[in-house]
Image (tube, rainbow, N blue to C red):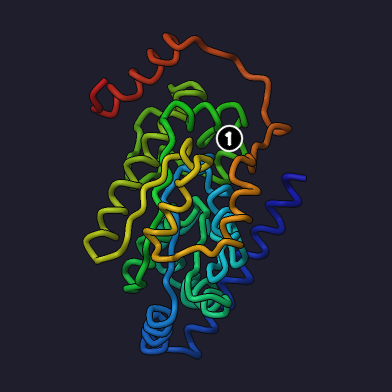
Amino acid sequence: MKFKYLFKNNFKNLSLKSSYHLNNILSSKDDHERLVKQVNSCKKIFFTLTSGRAGSQSLTNLLSCVEGITATHEPNPNFEWHLKEVEHNPRLAKNFWVHQKLPAILTSPNEIYVETSHMFSKGYFPAAFDLDLKMNVFCLSNSLRSTANSYYRLNVIPERTVSGRRFITSPKKSLILPYEGWENLDSYQLCYWYALESEARQKIYSQKIRNRGGKVIWVKTDCLSKKGEIERILGEIGVVPSKEDLRRISDIRSVRFNKKSGHKKQVQSFSSDELEEKENYVREKLGFAT
C-alpha cells in the first residue's frame, strides 16, 4: 500500500511539473501578474496558520453554514501535492499557485473564500506573499502539549514515521526552527518540537500579513464550540449571518469533527512531570525559556 501511494504520488508530481513547464512556456510573468490582480479584485481570501489537529475542520464546517462563504478544508488542487518539496523550492510553489490554486479559487462561487488546510503554511505561504496575493488568515491556537500529544497518539512523528514525513515539517529541513541532533529526541519530543515550530511559523507569517494590511483572526481551539465564538469570527470577516445561517450553526456547534479516534495508536503514556521534563529539554536545546 505504501509503495502504491509513493508510486502514484511521484507520478502525479512528475506530470504536474511537466504541465507547469509547458504552461510557463505558453504564458508570461505579465499573465501571472494579471491573474493575481484578478483574484485580488474579486475575492476575499482567508487561509489558516496552524499546526493541524487544532479545529480547522470544525472551523470549515461552521463557516460552511453561512450563505456567501465558500469554506473548504483540503480541496483539490491540494497543498499536499508538493508538500515535501516546496519549502526549499519556491519556484515549484509559485507554479502551483499560478497554474493550479489561483485558477481554482477564481471559479469558487462566492466572494469570500476560506481554506483551512494546515499545509498552506508549509512552503506555500512565502510564494503567495511574493506574488502579492491579498490574503487574510485565521491563526488557530491550541496548547503546545495538546498539539504534541495529538500527533504522538496518532503516530505522526516528524521525520520518524511515514505519515510524519508525509504531512508535517522536518526538524532537519525546517527553515523556521531547525533542530540539530533531532535524532536524539524521543517521539513525543519530536512532536513537541513540531508544535513549537508551528507556533513560531504562525507568529512570523501572521505579522507579515498584518504588515501588508491583511486581517489576522486568532481562534482558540477550545473556544470554537462556545456560543458567540463563530459569531465573533464572522463579525471580523465582515459577514452578518442570517437567522437560517445561525440555525445551521447551532445544529453543529458542539459536534466534534476529524477526531480520528480509530487512528490512535497504543503508545507509552507519561505523567505531567515526565512531559514537562521532556518539553523543557527541547526548549533548552532551542534556547527557549523553560
Where residue 16 sits: x, y (%)? 59, 71
Question: Toward which corner of the image does residue 137 lie, by quadrant?
Answer: bottom left
**Residue at coordinates 52% horizontally, 74% vertically from top-left?**
105
- Which residue type does callout 1 highlight? Val
Residue 140: x and y in percent read 43, 45
Q: Is residue 135 above or below residue 40?
A: above
Q: Point out residue 147 in the picture as x, y percentages from the top left corner.
A: 48, 32
Crowding at mark 1 (Cα within 10 Å: few <14, some 14-19, many 20+): many
Count of labels in the image: 1
Question: Left or right: 130 with respect to 254?
Answer: left
Q: Nearer the viewer, residue 11 or 102?
A: 102
Q: Which quadrant is home to the C terminus? A: top left
Side (left or right) of 47 relative to 246:
left
Between 12 and 125, the one lying in front of the other is: 125
Which residue is drawn at the image coordinates 45% and 46% (left, top)?
229
Mark 1, residue position:
156
Q: Is residue 81 visible?
A: no
- Quarter placement of the N terminus: top right
